[in-house]
Image: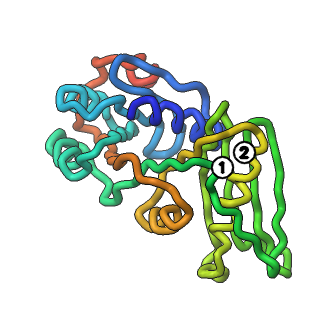
Amino acid sequence: MSEELRRWIEGWRLCRGLGAVSEDRDALGVVLGLPGRERELFALTDEAGVVDRLVGLAVEGVWLTVTTQDGDGVARRLAAGGLEVFAEQKVLMSTRLLDHPTPVTTEYEVELRSEGELEYVRVLAADGSVAARGMAAVVGRDAVMHDIQTDPGHRRRGLGSVVMGELSRRAVERGAETGLLMATVEGVHLYRKLGWVPEATMVTAKGSGGAGAVGGHLGAVLAGG
């Protein structure tokens, strides 16, 4: 699972315009520079000892994500360590892009744009407003989907599927074979219908002023501690 996580993070950080990923023996780390989310650590395993060490690094402004097959168990462990666990457990999913459906729409205009490793899709309503959109980072044989959204006024018209199909088609044209994404609970239902398979649960928590101490390394929590 750590290999799929590495691949997903590389595409995810490109989609978000983040810098290079830092790594130590137990985790990957990125700097986001957001209020309350300055940095985020991604555990490379859900082993108890590793999770406990990383909990000690999750000081205020640091988030910790653990990818696991035991979401509830990991959530309890993070909470016991003093972290604030987010209620929603997201899902790491994958698919074979060559098999991805590519539905079309005749009521909307589909706009495509490429920028380096990134592919962008926008679905435009008749008045020019954006009805749905999404992006993907194509990294080698992988395409990491990100920020798939449909405007509330245009939902239940299959536009999310159109966006995913166009991103998949463009990724295949660029040599990608596997799709990866982190899905919300709501998104999982759509992606399953399109052939995506859940691989693991992603449990995220954030540190507080009283949690842990920077001393377990990861570049002293990405040189920010």
The residue sitting at the left extreme is: 80
- Badge 2 is on which residue? 172
Q: Nearer the viewer, residue 39 or 190?
A: 190
Locate residue 155: give its quadrant. Answer: bottom right
Q: Say which residue appears at 67% left-offset and 58% top-offset.
A: 134
Relative placement, left or right, of 60 versus 19 is: left
Q: Say which residue appears at 28% left-offset and 19% top-offset.
A: 216
Where, quadrant-wise, is the N terminus in this rendering? top left
Which amino acid does the dot numbered 1 rest on? Leu
Locate residue 2: give its quadrant. Answer: top left
* Callout 1: SS: helix
Relative to 52, say whether 177 is above or below.
Answer: below
* Callout 2: SS: helix
Where, quadrant-wise, is the C terminus in this rendering? top left
Q: Say which residue appears at 48% left-offset and 31% top-offset.
A: 6
Q: Mark yes or no: residue 89 visible.
A: yes
Q: Mark yes or no: residue 16 visible.
A: no
Select label 1 or label 2 by which is in front. 1
Q: Earlier in the sequence, mark 1 or mark 2?
A: 1
- Badge 1 is on which residue? 98
Q: Residue 43 placed where, x, y %? A: 35, 32
Relative to 187, say whether 16 is above or below.
Answer: above
Q: Residue 129 placed where, x, y %? A: 79, 74
Distance Cα–Cα, label 1 vs label 2: 7 Å
Which amino acid does the dot numbered 2 rest on? Val
Q: Are marks 1 and 2 in contact (CB under 8 Å)?
A: yes
Q: Say which residue appears at 53% left-offset and 59% top-offset.
A: 195
Relative to 126, say whether 78 is above or below.
Answer: above
Q: Residue 165 placed where, x, y %? A: 68, 60
Q: Residue 193 placed where, x, y %? A: 52, 67
Relative placement, left or right, of 129 versus 4 is: right
Dot 2 alpha-carbon crowd within 10 angstroms: few under 14, some 14 to 19, many 20 or more = many
